Amino acid sequence: MISPGDTFDYERATFFMRQALREAEQAFEEKEVPVGAVVVKEGFVVGRGHNQMERLGDPTAHAEIVAIGAAAGHFESWRLLGATLYCTIEPCIMCAGAAVMARVDRIVYGAADPKFGGCDSIFRIPTDPRLNHRVQIVSGVLADEAAALMRRFFATRRTQQANG
């Protein structure tokens, strides 16, 4: 959550969330669950990713993990201090944990995930005071667009399954 005195630029957040949504669209085209993410530091995208679990056969190939890994490769360091992770959907517990481990400063996500959410919906991993690093959370940026993309994906999938 944004603390009093903190500034948050929603226009800037919308700009980067649109890039994450483009990644999610790429996942959709690849028949992956349409989640996209970008890591931004000092106004530049330094890592991007979309779900690739099906293509890679890897349960850890979530958009956030791919984007964090790309950003770490960019900096040749696992520490992403000063970075913001933009995700179309609320990160799961694995991805929320990865953001904490990578020391990102902020997670900005679109739609909540009531089944797997690791930031607000089920767990609050990034802000847990028992951990040695806490990540600021901002939710709801372009949430309607992110949720609509997920609904469209699963409706398409149900139709394809029904048609054999």
Image (cartoon, helix red, strand yellow):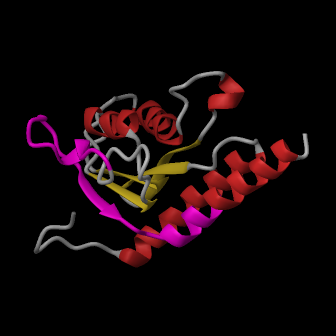
Corner quadrant of residue 8: bottom left
Residue furthest to the bottom in view is 11
Q: Nearer the viewer, residue 157 or 99?
A: 157
Instruction: Please tell me which residue is depicted at 65% across the width and 21% down the height of the picture.
Output: 57
Q: Is residue 145 magenta?
A: yes
Q: Can you say which quadrant of the picture contains the N terminus?
A: bottom left
Coordinates of residue 146 in the picture (x, y in percent): 56, 63
Number of callouts:
0
Residue furthest to the front in view is 162
Residue furthest to the right in view is 163
Residue furthest to the top in view is 57
Q: Can you say which quadrant of the picture contains the C terminus?
A: top right
Q: Nearer the viewer, residue 66 or 121?
A: 121
Instruction: Please tell me which residue is depicted at 30% across the width and 49% down the height of the picture.
Output: 119
Coordinates of residue 92 in the picture (x, y in percent): 40, 41
Up-down: is 151 above or below 63?
A: below
Q: Nearer the viewer, residue 53 or 148?
A: 148
Up-down: is 161 above or below 42?
A: above
Corner quadrant of residue 49: top right
Q: Horizontally, is 59 left or right of 130 in the view?
A: right
Coordinates of residue 148 in the picture (x, y in percent): 62, 66
Instruction: Please tell me which residue is depicted at 27% across the width and 32% down the height of the picture.
Output: 101
- In the image, which residues are magenta? 122-149
Q: Is residue 101 magenta?
A: no
